[in-house]
Structure formats: C-alpha cells, structure tokens
Image (spheres, helix red, strand yellow):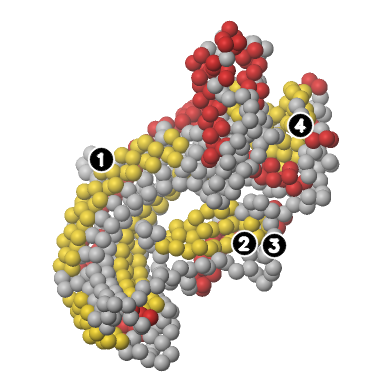
Amino acid sequence: MLEIHFVYDVVAALNSLKDVWNHTPPNWIGSDPCGSGWEGVRCTNFRVTAIKNLTISFYLRDLSYNKGLTGPIPPSIGNLKKLTNLILIGSGFSGPIPGTIGSLQQLVMLSLNSNSFSGPIPAQLGNLSNLYWLDLADNKLSGAIPVSDATTPGLDMLTNAKHFHFGKNQLSGEIPSQLFSSEMTLKHVLFENNSLSGSIPSTLGLVQTLEVLRLDRNSLTGPVPSNLNNLVNVNELFLSNNQLTGPLPNLTSMSVLNYMDMSNNTFDESDFPPWFSALQFLTTLVMENTGLQGQIPVSFFTLPQLQTLVLRNNQLNGTLDVGSSYSGQLTLIDLQNNSIVGFTQRSGFKIKQLILAGNPICPKTEGTSPYCSFQETNSTYSTPKNKCIPATCIAYQLSSPNCRCAYAYVGTLYLRAPSFSDLGNLTIYTSLADSLMKFFRSHDLLPVDSVSLSNPTRNTDNYVVLRLEVFPPAGQASWDPNKNSGDVPQLRGARSFSFAELKKYTNNFSETNDIGTGGYGKVYRGILPNGQLVAVKRAQTGSLQGGHEFKTEIELLSRVHHKNVVSLVGFCFEQGEQMLAYEYIPNGTLKESLSGKSGIKLDWMRRLRIALGTAKGLQYLHELANPPIIHRDIKSNNILLDDRLNAKVADFGLSKLLGDPERGHVTTQVKGTMVSNFLHNPDLKNQQ
C-alpha cells in the first residue's frame, strides 16, 4: 500500500478516471471512495490514506484486453503522486498520452500498449527517473522521439530504464543520436514497424547492456554502424525491411546471438561471411534478399542450436552440402531463388524442410525431387495432458492439463522478439509453460493449477503468437451441483458471504430493509462493515437453481464491469440459500421516476442521457462482455438510476448466454420494451 498525502487531489483524480472511463472496478460507486468502499482504496475516518497501485492487467483483473474500456486518460492522473505502476493494456483508450504522467516520480512501470493512443510521445516522460519499463507499443503515436534540451526533458534522461517498447506506431523522423549513451542501461529497444528514417545512430553501440534490438520495418538508410559489434550481450537482432546500404556488418563479437534477421536491405554483394560459423548459440539466420553470393560452408551447418536458415532471393551458387554433422535441431533450409546447381544428399538426411525451388538444380517444370517444391507446414502443438484422461466439460469450461474442468483465463501470448524459430520444438513450450508457472507463483498473482499453450503461429509482425489458458486450482475450478455448500467459487471482484454475514448486514432480513419483490424473491438493503450499501436478492424456495446453474451465473456476473451496468458485489451459497449482493442504486427504477413515485423529475436532456447510458450498458452486455450476456427483459423496471441519475442496467435473472464466445458468434435477442419508448411515449410526456 502507498501512503497518500494529497487527499483532495487524489479523490478528484479518482473521480476523474471514473467519469471518463467506461469500465472501472465494479464497486467504484458514487463520488466518495471512502463512503462507497472503492476497491484498492484505504480510508481512515472517511479520509483517503492509502491506495494500491493502479494496476489493470490481465493477471490481476479482467479489465485489460477489454475494448469496452474506452476514453482518454485525464490529465488529473498526475495527482496520483505515489503511483508506482500504471498498466492499461489492450483496451480501447484513445487520445493523447497526458504529459502529467511525467509528474508521477515514483512510477516504475508504464505500460499503455495495444490501445489507440495518438499524438506525440510526451517529452515529460523523461522526468520519470525511476522508470524501469516503458511500453507504448501498438498504438497510433506519431511524431519524433523526444530527447532533452536546455529547457525540456526527453527519453535520453531515462538512464534507469531497461525497456523501450515503441513498436507498431507511426513514429517518424530520425532516431536521435542523443537518445543513447554509455549511461543507459537498456536491455530491450523495440522500434519495429514505424516510419523512422535516417541512419542507425552509432551511439547505440554504447549501450552495452542491450540484449534485444528491433529496428525492422522502418525506412532506415546508410550503413550499419561498425560499433554495433560492441553489443556483446545482444541475442536477438532485427534490422530487416529497411533501406540499409554498404557492406554487411561484421558482428563476430555478438557471441550469444540467437536470432538475426537483416533481410530486404540493399547491402553490397558479398560472399557468405565466415564469421556466421562462429555464432555458437545461433538458432535462426534470415538473410533474404541481401546480396549474398558464393557457397555456404559445410561448417556453418554444425552450429549446435541451428534451427532455421532462410537465404532465399540471393546469388548463392555451387553445390549445397550440409555434411553429416549438421545440427540435430535443424528443421528448415530455405534457399529458393538462388543459383545452386547441385545437392549432396547423404544417407540418413532427416531435415524436415529443404526448399531449393527456383534454383538451376530444379527444372522450371515441376520435378520429382521433394526439395523442388514448397510445402508449408504448421505446428499443431497443444500442451499434453499429465498422464490422465481429458474430462468432458460443460459449456465455457475447459479441461486443464490435469484433466480438471474449469473456467480458465484465456488469452493470447505474444513473443515480440523470440529467440527461436522452430514452432514445432516441444521443449520450447514446456520450458515456457514452466516459466509462466514460476512467474505466477513467485509474484503471488493468482492461485494457478496449470497453464496450457497451443496453436503457435508467426504473425505478419514476426511475433510468435500462442493461445494461453490459465487454470485455477481444483477447489476453485469445480463445483458439486448436488451440494449447496462446500466448494464455493473464489472469484476476483465478487466476495463469498456467509449466510450469517448477510443476515447481520440486512438486520435479519427485516421488513424495514425490504426494498422490493420479484419473481426471483425479495430484495433487501444491507450495510457492509466498510459502510458500503448493497442490495441483497434472496431467492425464494421455488426459484432456487441447481448448484451448477447458480455457480455459472455468478461466474459470469463477476466478470461484468461497466459504469452503466449494476455490479455484483458478492453472493451466498450455503444453508440452502442462494443470494446475490449487488451494488445499491439509491434512486430506484426508471419506472418510478417516470411515474412520479420517486419525486424525481426528468427533463428531456436527462432522459436522453439515461437512454444513451442504457444503450451503452446493453451494448457492453451483448457485444463486449466475455462471454456476451443477452438481457431478455429490458424495461423501465430494470433500469436503475444512481446518485447522479446515470442509468444502470439491472436484473440479470432472465439473462441468457447465446452462441459460442470463443468463436465470436453471438445471436442477439432482446425481449421487452425498447429504450426509446420512454422518450416517445405520449402518455409519459406530462411526467417531466
């Protein structure tokens, strides 16, 4: 927890975030973080005294990678002076990155990647002297890379940063030579897929801590600086798809290099460099269309970790001989469109793909030799089961590697600078899964039973992409439908209440706390120990669901987070009871306001805002929630009004899941009155 001294500014900043964003933590209700018990906020005597790091990422909340979380970051975020981590990944944020982030002096991690941010990189980010990780990749950022001068800061001041991730933007201009110096401690410099021009600055060779360098898919010109050979720790080097000229650089000192791609440049013609054969850790060499000529020496194929060699569209000639001591990991040799006239084929040759199409050795008409045709192979890897029989699971559950059915966290894992190229190498995925498990456990992020990786591919950005499934432990993954107690699901964002607790919070379900009755049962107002008001729906005997159905409902409702949808606070599933505790909405239903029962008068501008808010809530439920939830009873009784008269869609008792959210097919069916009814119904016009 981080102590907060600027109480007023912090409250204002938190309310600013809530008002601008469409998708905040479920219990950020009202304007008082203390009175409403906002998640992550600690209060003493109704004053903000501490706040957890504002961290919204795939492993801590299900808010990241959610396109429903939209809007700009307000400048008031600069008031959160004690913030150390700001992680807003893969959502729908837009607009400029506010320069006020540069005032967050304790910020260590800033990840705003995979959104729609536009405009320049704020020069004020150079003031973040403690920053370790800066990830602005996959946005719409434009303009030059800012560096400091006598009056303004710049990114060259981030001498403690280890990660510069700026790929997949629209950055332009030269890479400033001032950006790099011997004082920098960078490990990753990722500038791929921008519109950067000019030469590669020689100052880059001063950053001897560098391990990964991606400058590919830009418009860089001139020769590769010779002092890049000083970067002895680099293991991934991507310079492809530029306009680089001059001789091929001699990178003999990059002795730990795993992956090198310098394809599609305009280097001087040269023989196959002998120093390639000295790279003992090389897994992948991609030099397509780089002016290579002559023969490939047999010694090159003895590199022990070599997996992939792609040298198509060059002038290599002579007879290809891979020898008899080639790497046991070698799976692909692609030499299409060269001048090779022969191939020494030895007994026991087992390389999966050898492609010589477009060489003199292969006739122009289709030949009989397998290496004269191109056959693309795809990996179908999936984490194997751990010596068990896969379980047959119900809808939306998956079978884990330990053969347990669970509602898994499912996402996509992107490797932006992979050190391997053989997507069929099973040991790589085993090692990666082990690393993920160690990461989850060491950081105490989630109780994790197992992880599964599958469907590896390489996308157009040359990233390796995998499907990732993260499974909770057995006690949280399964539910006995024949019991009404025992294995209660543990959900982030939804608390498991005991019957005794809800009985106490509602004053023994007293009549004075009875605030409504429906087909589901009765609804009671309750007060939690932190002062938060809740609405507790208590199912009557005839409305009790099966254990599995009730669990499925709360699993789904716990994932619903939108400012125009009533949020689930918790549930109770014991002693034969099924209760759901929602956030309490103080101004009742829209129907009560329209009929005059609530005493609230709605002018037509307010009605329009309520209609728009309702539409946003329904759009979220039907299209953006994961999986989508189809509300089948839309009417004014099921639209609640909060303390600011904002609309909140409620009553999921008749909600229904349709289609297969894994494949994106959902059939929208909405039953009941439409939102526009209360705008145009002549019987309501006198209720202003």
Q: Amino acid at mark 2?
A: Ser
User: Which dot marks residue 391?
Assistant: 3
Confirm or deny contact between disc 2 and disc 1 (CB under 8 A).
no
- Find residue 663 and report its horizontal and vertical position in percent: 54, 51
**Separation (CA) of disc 4 from disc 3:** 33 Å
Among the two numbered marks 2 and 1 on one chain, the one whose residue lies closer to the N terminus: 1
Q: Mark 2: few, some, or many residues within 10 Å (few <14, many ≥20)?
A: some
Q: Earlier in the sequence, mark 3 or mark 2?
A: 3
Asked which quadrant contains residue 103, the reply is top left
Between residues 524 and 111, which one lies in front from this camera angle? 524
Q: Give the residue type at disc 1.
A: Thr
Write down the residue under mark 2.
450
Determine whether the residue tagged by mark 3 lies in a helix, strand or loop: loop
Taking the image as drawn, is residue 10 in sight? Answer: no
Which residue is identified by label 4? Answer: 520
Judge left or right: residue 414 versus residue 655. Answer: left
Q: Residue at x 61, y 24 (%)?
A: 673
Amino acid found under the numbered disc labelled 3? Ala
Closest to the camera, between mark 4 and mark 2, is 4
Q: Earlier in the sequence, mark 4 or mark 3?
A: 3
SS at circle 1: loop
* Residue occupying image coordinates x 19% and y 72%: 291
